[in-house]
Image: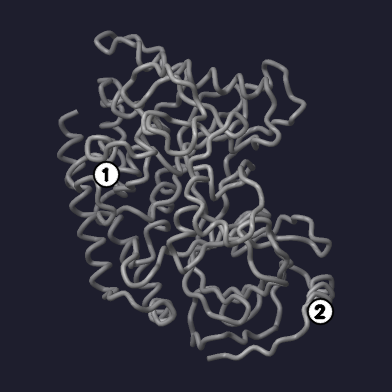
Amino acid sequence: MLKIKHIPLLVFVLIFINCAKDEPVDSVEATPLVSAVEIGNSELPYIKIKTISTVLNEPKIGGEMEIYINKKRVLNSPIGIEYRGSTSYRISDKKSFGIETRDSSGKGKDVSILGFPAEEDWILTGDVFQAPNTIFDRTLMYHYLGYELFRNMGNYSSRSKFVEVELNGVYIGVYVLMEKLKRGTDRINIESLAAADTDAAKITGGYILKIDKTSGSDVLGTHPLSYYDNNWDDDCRYTEFNSFRSNYDINRNRITFAPYGPPYHNNKYLETYFVYDYPKAETINVAQKAYIKNYVNDFETALLTDNFSTNTRTYTNYIDRKSFIDFFIINEVAGNIDGYRLSTYMHKARGGKLKMGPIWDLNIGYGTGGRVPVNDWIINYNSYITNDAWMVPFWWKRLMEDPQFRSELKARWTELRANTLSTPKVLELTTNTANYLTVNNAIIRNYTKWTGINYNYNNSVTDLKTYLTNRLAWMDSKIATF
């Protein structure tokens, strides 16, 4: 085991600041890699992170990040780093991290990492792992495959690459470096909204909303790290400050009880909340809140009141139906148990319609999440689980009642199955990704670090490919009847 000599914190900080000022953040350098584990000729990028103190949930603490490819340094940058995630943070020994690339003064700085468009906000996602029982994704591929497939369908999804990570001299395994979902030309491409913007035309966009828990994000304040080990109530702490509630419950009835009740109150399972992601809760103004809330509620009313036995639709005045169809397809292919009800993003450009996506968080899926049988739609979650604090909104089953929606879905599915989502192409992506991780011995190193759970990687990959083959065929059989 590698031993690290302890040096006084002040000395480390001074060394770090001086190095950060002197070295560029985006040029190839001759500095060779000295790693905590031997990686041989691995082609996976290797990331070394050093921090000035213990990593917290919030706020980010200072540090330094070096990235090596083929054991040669290609990036050296000051960073801010924090833990991220809500449930995954509590139940996983292998933590995920939020990263901000910074300049030498500590201000956020856009940097291109591993060929991705320059930005300052990044995520290192680790698979959930807690011995002896908890592991969702033995293949380490669930997020990556879903994001790649969604992008191949012609949508934006977080650009992602496998990396290996070392934190303060300790190897911590295989991670996926990915873009944080946020507004930006190369990410969610919508217009900016300032706190001073109240003009009627201007406040039609852009917005990013999400159906999600209220922890693991920027809505909550700063607490000691120990607080986040058991803060289950903060998952469900919706307020007028951070969100608005649908006028309708999951059964399509107008809600008559007051919003923003205490966490996990008896009727919480009936509610759907929309959390402000952009503009942030701290900056969104009253006019903007009123606009986006009314827009969503008007869409819901139109969806419920349209007569699907006629050719007239009004709900389509509010949503981009193709984006809803693609979002449905990727969640159903992946068997994403959290789909539609958690980590569910939507966005609206100025003057445009509401769009679903990007896709996010697929670690409980691909036939391993339980709760919904593999031969049923994930949108039917509510038929199997009762009184969950986060249920599937009524939107999806109502949309599937519309013959026009089903017809468009069938046409889109037929198009995708002929190319992007053909079984050979999906299996090829899966096989190539698994081979990349195994040939470079990254899987061995990861599971040497994270021990205590029985697994056979090749069998896990085979199970994943079997699931995908069967799921695609099952969806063929169902969609053919639309």
Residue 65, image x and y in percent?
A: 67, 71
Q: Is mark 2 in CB contact (under 8 Å) with mark 1?
A: no
- Report the quarter where the C terminus lies: top left
The numbered mark, 2 or 1, whose residue comes first in the sequence reads: 2
290 or 152, nearer to the observer: 290
192 or 481, nearer to the observer: 192
Mark 2 vs mark 1: give the one in front: 2
In this picture, is 192 found above or below 248?
Answer: below
Task: Say left or right for 53 vs 263.
Answer: right
Q: Residue at x 47, y 37 (%)?
A: 211
Kind of residue sitting beneath label 2: Ile
Q: Give the number of marks.
A: 2
Which SS class for mark 2? Answer: helix
Instruction: Report crowding for label 2: few under 14, some 14 to 19, many 20 or more residues within 10 A (C-alpha).
Output: few
Instruction: Report crowding for label 1: few under 14, some 14 to 19, many 20 or more residues within 10 A (C-alpha).
Output: some
Q: How much space separates mark 2 and mark 1, taking CA atoms? A: 55 Å
Q: Residue at x 53, y 42 (%)?
A: 214
In this picture, is 149 found above or below 219?
Answer: below
Label annotation for residue 417: 1
Label annotation for residue 15: 2
Residue 327, image x and y in percent?
A: 39, 38
